[in-house]
Structure formats: C-alpha cells, structure tokens
Amino acid sequence: MQSLEVWWKVRLSIFVVLKKKVQSLCFLLAGMKFQNFWTRLKGIISLAVLINSLFFLCTVLCQLSISVKFFTDH
C-alpha cells in the first residue's frame, strides 16, 4: 500500500512540473509576435525540449506503473 502512495506522490510532482513548464511556454509563445527572430527561435527550441521532456516523462511513468503493479501483485 505504501508503494501506491509513493506512486501517487511521484505522479503529482511530475504533473506540477509539467504544468509550470507548459505555462511558461505559453507565455513565451504568446509574446512571440512582438519579438525578434532569435527570441522566436528560442521559443521553438523550448517547445522541442518540452515535447522531448513529455516523451521522457511518459516513459518514466510507464516504467513506474509496471514496477508498482509488479510489487503490488507479488
């Protein structure tokens, strides 16, 4: 039961981090039309990094769910 509690805490902390990243990216993209080329390029790179982070976090979540399922079943 304790592993399930840890699992939910991990999911919540990942969600909070993702929410902050998405909010900062939205603010950056909203102000892009007033900015120069280099700032736009920085925004596009930030978007690519965010997408990469999302894929990585999804992989971690899948591994954690498999681990939690294994330990709770045995």
Image (cartoon, helix red, strand yellow):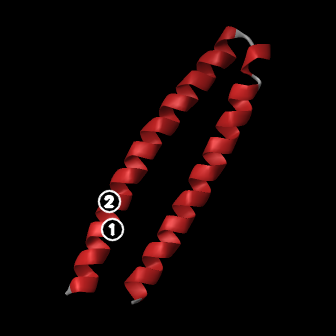
32 relative to 73, above or below: above
Contact (CB < 8 A) between labels 2 and 1? yes
Q: Residue at x 47, y 37 (%)?
A: 51
Q: Residue at x 22, y 84 (%)?
A: 73
- Which part of the image, by quadrant, shows the C terminus? bottom left
Q: Amino acid at mark 2?
A: Cys
Residue 21: % across, % down: 62, 45
1 vs 43: above or below: below
| x and y percentages locating residue 41 in the rendered image | 60, 17
Which quadrant would residue 2 be assigned to in this image? bottom left
Calculate the distance from the C-alpha at mark 2 to the C-alpha at mark 1. Answer: 5 Å
Residue 54 drawn at (x, y percent): 45, 45
Q: Which residue is mark 2?
A: 62
Which residue type does callout 1 highlight? Answer: Ser
In the image, farthest residue toward the left = 74
Q: Residue furthest top?
A: 37
Position in image of residue 6 (x %, y %): 45, 78
Residue occupied by mark 1: 65
Q: Is residue 70 above or below residue 74?
A: above
Residue under the point 73% across and 11% down = 36
State left or right for residue 59 relative to residue 46. left
Residue 57's tag is none
Left or right, residue 22 beside residue 71: right
Kindly state the secondary structure of the residue where label 1 is placed.
helix
Q: Secondary structure at mark 2?
A: helix
Q: Is residue 60 left or right of residue 54?
A: left
Q: How many marks?
A: 2
Give residue 65's quadrant in the image.
bottom left
